[in-house]
Image (cartoon, rainbow, N blue to C red):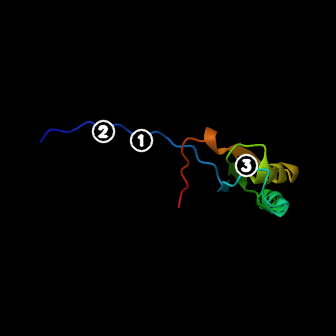
Amino acid sequence: PRQVARMSEPQLPVIPRAVCVYCASSKSCDPQHHADAYRLGELLAGDGRTVIYGGSKSGSMGAVANGALAAGGQVAPGHKVELLHCPA
């Protein structure tokens, strides 16, 4: 039988210990949601996690990123991460 050429799969970026968080970018929700998102960012950064988020600077989305950055963590906007591969 004839062999069919297969395209190799592209190497996917691996962001170790990353957590993807998507939440509202609206400023019109309960301020406690923003405070909780900020704290979540702090906790994730404190655990050495990279926070992948929706990319907005406002609302809970911005708060989670700001919390991570304030705690010395790393963030990556999700719209710039085409595809993530999380090894099992």
Farthest-out residue, front: 28
Task: Tell me the kind of residue under disc 3.
Answer: Ser
Residue sitting nearer the eye, 20 or 9: 20
The earlier-in-sequence mark between 3 and 2 is: 2
Residue sitting nearer the eye, 15 or 37: 37
Picture quadrant where residue 56 is located: top right
Residue ID at (70%, 53%): 24
Instruction: Find out whether the residues at labels 2 and 1 contact each other: C-beta distance under 8 Å.
Output: no
**Element type at mark 3:** loop
Task: Tell me the kind of residue under disc 2.
Answer: Arg
Task: Tell me the kind of residue under disc 1.
Answer: Glu
Residue ID at (78%, 46%): 58
Q: In 3D space, how far apart are the residues under numbered discs 1 and 3 (Cα atoms)?
A: 34 Å
On the rendered structure, is 1 left or right of 78?
left
**Element type at mark 2:** loop
Where is residue 35? Give x, y as percent: 85, 60
Q: Quadrant of the N terminus?
A: top left
**Residue tagged 2:** 6
Picture quadrant where residue 76 is located: top right
**Element type at mark 1:** loop
Where is residue 53? Give x, y as percent: 69, 49
**Residue tagged 1:** 9
Instruction: Find out whether the residues at labels 1 and 3 contact each other: C-beta distance under 8 Å.
Output: no
**Residue tagged 3:** 25
Residue ID at (60%, 42%): 81
Q: In 3D space, how far apart are the residues under numbered discs 2 and 1 (Cα atoms)?
A: 9 Å
